[in-house]
Image (tube, grey):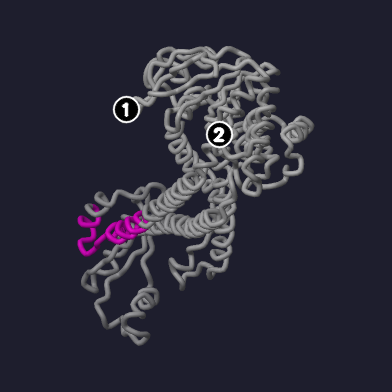
Amino acid sequence: MIELQDAGYGYDGRALLSSISLSLAPGSFHFLTGPSGAGKTTFLKLLYAELTATAGRVNIFGQDPRMLSRDEVSDMRRRIGVVHQDCQFLDHLPMRENVALPLTVARRDVSAEADNLDELLSWVGLSGQAASLPPELSGGERQRAALARAVITSPEIILADEPTGNVDWEMSQKLLTLLVQLNKMGKTIVVATHDLNLIRAAKAQVSTRVLRIAGGTIQAAGADL
Amino acid sequence: MSALMDRINALLAPEKGADRVVPPTGFTASLTMFSSGAMAFLAVFAMALSLATTRLADRWGAELARSSTVRISAPEEQMAAQTSAVVAILETTPGVRSARALSDAEQKALLEPWFGPDLPLENLPVPQLIEVVEEGDGFDPQGLRLRLQAEAPGAALDDHTRWRRPLVDAANRLRTLGIMSLLLIAATPGAMITLAANAALSANAQVVSVLRLVGARDRYIANAFVRRFTLRAFVGALGGTLLGMIAMALLPEASTAGGFLTGLGFQGIHWFWPLTVPPLAGVVALLATRAAAQRTLKGLT
């Protein structure tokens, strides 16, 4: 599904990531750990082509994004749901429209998928906040809304960057439960986090693989905690 | 053609939700509409000026080109003979429709503005004037001058060339200036809308980034901005054009006494020309915004 071959990324002659080779199989669940500034977010950005590898290659759905047109990259991103650390919403739109944004930009009829949208908002516990603007929501609610937006088009891969970074333990458990459910539905999940308790809780529910980034490369692929 | 119409329809027909992804930008909207309206107002005047000078150049050229004057300065005893000879020559000259010697009363009327009504014309050595009206492509002035010189040595042909040429040149230059003004007026809102679109895109960098993140294609994002600016420019230009047309309609009627200034308005079918300004403003806005959006989006991943 996603394959990295000796991939690296750097800028201004400085290598941030280097010599990363691994494969993310369909339906797998991965945690990405490592100290702050190790390159977890950069690694995730390589996986949905917000950044492109400056060394080696990253194949997403069998294609190197560097060889694709901008429209083809956009089409590829529709198959990947991303939960950013800072969520990234359009602050002038109500949450319901924010969650439906991937449908809107794909020119799909949102009204025809209203039932799915309501069900999804209910699933993440945001039915009562559907009409609220993003700044009116708490950190946890924003994280859940970001997750809902990431899965609204039923993408094959879900990437989440510190999805529990701004929420309490109880809320992080709820988010983990959502991610585990998605994985059980066959989605490939990659979660960047330094919350080891979250990883332990996940491993109790589903088979996961932990990737540790340090020194600019994956140091312990496949290692269990 | 149908493909082009489909593209225009796709651009102008609002997509569900697409227009809402870009937040409202009140100040930029007002600025775009105002500048487009102001430029459309000026464009109507420039168009009127250009059309009026075209009419003027044609009129001056046509009127002066179709008439000439033969002036006979001869001793009194030869005046009648030379006048008859000149008229006879003119009547047999190809390109001359008619030739007529002005009467004393007519000549007196011509001199009256300079010398007053009590001019004793009979006591003055006033030359005899012969009015020549041309037809078709006119006569050969060089050949006519040679014949007049041979048969009426006191006759001099004035074909108005030296008067006509600078007037027609002046009118043509005014027309060129009018067209240049129109082009500049068309380019100015283009530049202003480019600046406004760039400002809107910069102010909405976060919006553009989120849209790219969720898989929006460049054309989708660009169209959201293009549609907004195109419609604003069109509406602004429509208002400016209507105001300009009303102002032109309120100008005084064309009159001889008023000269060029009173002939500045539109006449007949020319009233339809200003109606091309709003669609053209829309096209200029569309091209300017699209270019700005594509340039900005290419800089993003």
Badge count: 2
Report the magenta residues as a range.
B147-173
Quadrant assignment for the N terminus of chain B? top right
Towards the viewer: B185 or A33 = A33
Towards the viewer: A206 or B266 = A206
Quarter assignment of residue A143: top right
Q: Is residue B274 above or below residue A48?
A: below
Q: Residue at x 54, y 29 (%)?
A: A193
Where does the image place residue A4, in percent across and percent down from the top left? Answer: 46, 14
Q: Secondary structure at mark 2?
A: loop
Q: Residue at x 69, y 32 (%)?
A: A174
Most common SS among magenta residues: helix
Query: Which residue is labeled 2 in the image?
Result: A84
Q: Secondary structure at mark 1?
A: strand
Q: Is residue B237 visible?
A: no
Q: Is residue B144 magenta?
A: no
Report how far apart the C-alphas of labels 1 and 2 lie in the structure: 25 Å
Q: Is residue A97 above or below residue A31?
A: below
Q: Is residue A37 above or below residue A215?
A: below
- What's the amino acid at mark 2? His
Does A9 sit left or right of B282 as displayed? left
Q: Earlier in the sequence, mark 1 or mark 2?
A: 1
Towards the viewer: A84 or B145 = A84
- What's the amino acid at mark 1? Arg
The chain ID associated with circle 1 is A
Where does the image place residue A176, in percent across and percent down from the top left? Answer: 65, 28
Where does the image place residue A82, in percent across and percent down from the top left? Answer: 58, 29
Query: Which residue is labeled 1 in the image?
Result: A14
Q: Residue at x 53, y 58 (%)?
A: B34
